[in-house]
Image (spheres, rainbow, N blue to C red):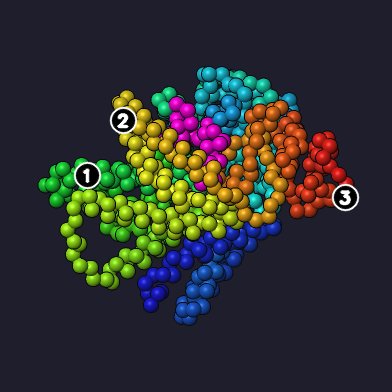
C-alpha cells in the first residue's frame, strides 16, 4: 500500500545522498570507467529483476547510490579548481570579482587571476581571495588591478572532523587566500577582454555594492550592516560581538539569506498581490489570481537570489521554494514531502558536495520535520468533528489569534530546533540553550523587518525608500538589543570535550560561507575569533590563544596552529603535527618535550 501511494519516491534523494556521501568519503579518487561500469551493472540488474519486487527495489536503491557516486565525481571533475600547494609571495594581476568592507576596516577582494610575476607561478590558481588595508576609491568589480601579495593555500579543518575550509574553497573555485603586502593599484578601470558573463557578473556586483552603500547611508551603524546583509547579502561589516550574540542565541540564521528570507519575500509578494486583486472582485472571480501571485513571487525570489549574490544557501532555498510555487501554478499542493524530495534531488544533482555540509543537512531536516508535523496536524484536525466557533468580542478574538500565532511560532521553533540540534552538535560542537526564547521574541520583529525590506526594495528606484529603511533600522535595533540581552544570560553553549580554544586572528567568515538555515556559521561555530594586536586584520595571520595565553603571531608566515590527531609533541595538552606548528610554538617559548 505504501508503494502504491508513491512513498518509495521519497527515498530517491536519500539514496542519491548516500552515494554522494560515499564518494566524498573515499580515501582514493575513483576513475570514471569504474563508476560508469557500476552504474551500468546495477541498472541492468534493476531492469532484469522487475518480476521480483523486493529484489527490484534493492537494485533500484543500489542504482541510485551509484548515480550519487557518479554525480559527485562529475562535479569534482567539472569544477577542477587549481589549488595553491604552498605559501608564496608574488606580483599578482587580476580582475576584481567582488569587494567587501570588513568590520576591521580592511577590504576583502575576490580576484580572478590573469598573471603572476616575480616569481611566475606555473600552477596558478584561477581565483583567490585577498584582503587589503586600503584600495583606490575608484576600484570596482571588473577593475584590472595589480599588487604584491602573499598567497596561502586554503586551510584544512582546525580540529579533526571539523569544518574544512579547503573543501568548500575547492567547490567555490577559490584556489588560495592571503593578503596584499602593499595597497593594490588599478591597471585599468575595466578589463576590455572580459566575456559577457563576467561583464554581467561585474554589473550585478557593482549594483549590490551601490545598494549596500545606499542602505548604510540611510541606516547607520550595525543596523545598516545587517540591513545590507538582509537585502543584498553583504555581511562582512557586521560587528563580531553582534555575530557572536546571535550565534549564542541561535538566531544567526536570520543574517544568512536562506529559506526564511526567500519564504518571507515570496509570502509578502503573494499577500500584497492577492490583497490587491481582492479589490477587483469581478476580475478575481474570472481569473486565476492565485497563480498570477505565485508567478510574481517566483520572479521576485529569482531577482532576490541574483541581487543577494547567488550564494549556495540562497540557491538551495530558491530551488526548494521554486518547486513549491510551480506546484501552485499547476494546481498541486505546495507543502508536501514529494515537493521536498524533488527539491532535494535537484540540489543533489546540481551540487552533490552540499550533501556532506551542515547547511544542506540542517535545512532539509528542519523543512522535513515541519512538513511532516503540519501534515500530521492537518490529518488530526480532519478526523475530528468541530462545533461552530462561539461568538467572541473583538478583544477576545484578537487575544485568541495572538495566542494561536504565539503557539504556532513556539511549535515551529521546537520542531525545527529538535530536528537540527544533533547536526549542530556534530558539526559545531555547540548548541543554543535559549534559542526557543530568542526565536519567540525575535521572529515577529524579523517578519516585520523583512516586509519593510521588500517595501524598501520596491520603493528604492523611485527614491521613496527612506521611511521603510528608517523603520527597518528601528526593528533591527530592537532585534540586536534582545539578542544581546538573551546572550548575556545564556549558559555555556559548547558541548563535548573541554579543549582549549584556538583563536584565529582577523579572519572573518569568508563570503562563500553561507550556512544559513537554522544553524550557526560553520566558520566560527567551534572557534572564538580574536584580533591580532600586532597585525590587526591580517586575513590569515596565525594568532593563537592557548588556555587564555597568546602564543604569538606568525603573520609573516601566515600559518595557523591546528590540533591534529597524530603528533609527537604537545603544548598545554594540545597536539601538534607539522614542523611549522612546532617551530612557531618553539619561537613563542611554549613548547615542552614530553
Which SS class for mark 1?
helix
Q: Nearer the viewer, mark 1 or mark 3?
A: 3
**Which residue occupies 35% across, 58% down?**
335
Location of residue 100 with respect to 448 vertically, above or below: above
Q: Gap in Å between the C-alphas at discs 2 and 1?
A: 19 Å
Q: Gap in Å between the C-alphas at discs 1 and 3?
A: 73 Å
Q: Is residue 188 visible?
A: yes
Q: Which residue is mark 3?
A: 594
**Which residue occupies 55% across, 56% down?**
423
| Residue 520 x %, y % | 54, 47
The span shown in magenta is 220-249
Q: Which residue is mark 2?
A: 459
Location of residue 120 with respect to 138 vertically, above or below: below
**Which residue occupies 74% across, 33% down?**
553
Camera-nearest residue between 257 and 221? 221
**Mark nearer the N terminus (2 vs 1):** 1
Camera-nearest residue between 278 and 452? 452
Camera-nearest residue between 40 and 400? 400
- The verdict on residue 235 being magenta is yes
**Which residue occupies 38% across, 53% down?**
409
Q: Residues within 10 Å of mark 2 (few under 14, many from 20)?
A: some
Apparent side of residue 388 relative to residue 98 in the rendered image (left or right): left
**Mark nearer the N terminus (2 vs 3):** 2
Q: Residue furthest right?
A: 593
Location of residue 559 with respect to 157 vertically, above or below: above
Quadrant of the image for the N terminus? bottom left
- The verdict on residue 370 being magenta is no
Which SS class for mark 2?
helix
Q: Which residue is mark 1?
A: 275
Amino acid at each position: 500500500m505504501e508503494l502504491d501511494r508513491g512513498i518509495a519516491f521519497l527515498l530517491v534523494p536519500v539514496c542519491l545522498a548516500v552515494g554522494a556521501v560515499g564518494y566524498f568519503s573515499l580515501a582514493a579518487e575513483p576513475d570514471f570507467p569504474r563508476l560508469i561500469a557500476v552504474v551500468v551493472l546495477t541498472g541492468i540488474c534493476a531492469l532484469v529483476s522487475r518480476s521480483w519486487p523486493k529484489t527490484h527495489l534493492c537494485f533500484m536503491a543500489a542504482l541510485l547510490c551509484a548515480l550519487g557516486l557518479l554525480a559527485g565525481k562529475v562535479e569534482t571533475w567539472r569544477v577542477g579548481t587549481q589549488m595553491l600547494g604552498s605559501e608564496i609571495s608574488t606580483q599578482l594581476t587580476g580582475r576584481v570579482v567582488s569587494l567587501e568592507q570588513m568590520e576591521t576596516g580592511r577590504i576583502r577582494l575576490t580576484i580572478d587571476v590573469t598573471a603572476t610575476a616575480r616569481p611566475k607561478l606555473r600552477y596558478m590558481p584561477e581565483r583567490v581571495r585577498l584582503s587589503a588595508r586600503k584600495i583606490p576609491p575608484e576600484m570596482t568589480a571588473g577593475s584590472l588591478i595589480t599588487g604584491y601579495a602573499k598567497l596561502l593555500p586554503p586551510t584544512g579543518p582546525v580540529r579533526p572532523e571539523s569544518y574544512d575550509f579547503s573543501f568548500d574553497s575547492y567547490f567555490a573555485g577559490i584556489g588560495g587566500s592571503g593578503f596584499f603586502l602593499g595597497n593594490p593599484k588599478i591597471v585599468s578601470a575595466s578589463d576590455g577582454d572580459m566575456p559577457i558573463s563576467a561583464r554581467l557578473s561585474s554589473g550585478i556586483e557593482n549594483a549590490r555594492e551601490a545598494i549596500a552603500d545606499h542602505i548604510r547611508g540611510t541606516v547607520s551603524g550595525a543596523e545598516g550592516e545587517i540591513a545590507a546583509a538582509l537585502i543584498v547579502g553583504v555581511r562582512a561589516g557586521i560587528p563580531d560581538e553582534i555575530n557572536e550574540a546571535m550565534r549564542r542565541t541561535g538566531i544567526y540564521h536570520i543574517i544568512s539569506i536562506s529559506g526564511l528570507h526567500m519564504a518571507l519575500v515570496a509570502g509578502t509578494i503573494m499577500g500584497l498581490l492577492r490583497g490587491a486583486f481582492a479589490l477587483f472582485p469581478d476580475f478575481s472571480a474570472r481569473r486565476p489570481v492565485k497563480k498570477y501571485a505565485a508567478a510574481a513571487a517566483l520572479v521576485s525570489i529569482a531577482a532576490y537570489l541574483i541581487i543577494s549574490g547567488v550564494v549556495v544557501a540562497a540557491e538551495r532555498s530558491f530551488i526548494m521554494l521554486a518547486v513549491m510555487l510551480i506546484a501552485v501554478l499547476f494546481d498541486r499542493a505546495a507543502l508536501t514531502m514529494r515537493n521536498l524530495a524533488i527539491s532535494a534531488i535537484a540540489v543533489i544533482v546540481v551540487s552533490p558536495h552540499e550533501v556532506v555540509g551542515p547547511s544542506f543537512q540542517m535545512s532539509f531536516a528542519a523543512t522535513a520535520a515541519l512538513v511532516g508535523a503540519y501534515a500530521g496536524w492537518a490529518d488530526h484536525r480532519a478526523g475530528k468533528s468541530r462545533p461552530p466557533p462561539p461568538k467572541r468580542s473583538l478583544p477576545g478574538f484578537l487575544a485568541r489569534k495572538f495566542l494561536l500565532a504565539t503557539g504556532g511560532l513556539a511549535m515551529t521553533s521546537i520542531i525545527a530546533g529538535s530536528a537540527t540540534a544533533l547536526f549542530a552538535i556534530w558539526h559545531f560542537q555547540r548548541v543554543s540553550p535559549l534559542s526557543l526564547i530568542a526565536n519567540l521574541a525575535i521572529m515577529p520583529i524579523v517578519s516585520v523587518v523583512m516586509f519593510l525590506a521588500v517595501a524598501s526594495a520596491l520603493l528604492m528606484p523611485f527614491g521613496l525608500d527612506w521611511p521603510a529603511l528608517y523603520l527597518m533600522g528601528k526593528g533591527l535595533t530592537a532585534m540586536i538589543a534582545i539578542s544581546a540581552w538573551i546572550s548575556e544570560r545564556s549558559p555555556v553553549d559548547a558541548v563535548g570535550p573541554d579543549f582549549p580554544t584556538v583563536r584565529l586572528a582577523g579572519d572573518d567568515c569568508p563570503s562563500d560561507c553561507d550556512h544559513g538555515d537554522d544553524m550557526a556559521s560553520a566558520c566560527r561555530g567551534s572557534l572564538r575569533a580574536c584580533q591580532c594586536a600586532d597585525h590587526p586584520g591580517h586575513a590569515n595571520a596565525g594568532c593563537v590563544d592557548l588556555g587564555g595565553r597568546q602564543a604569538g603571531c606568525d603573520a609573516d608566515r601566515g600559518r595557523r596552529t591546528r590540533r591534529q590527531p597524530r603528533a609527537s609533541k604537545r603544548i598545554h595538552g594540545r597536539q601538534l603535527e607539522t614542523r611549522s606548528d612546532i617551530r612557531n610554538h618553539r619561537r613563542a617559548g611554549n613548547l615542552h618535550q614530553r
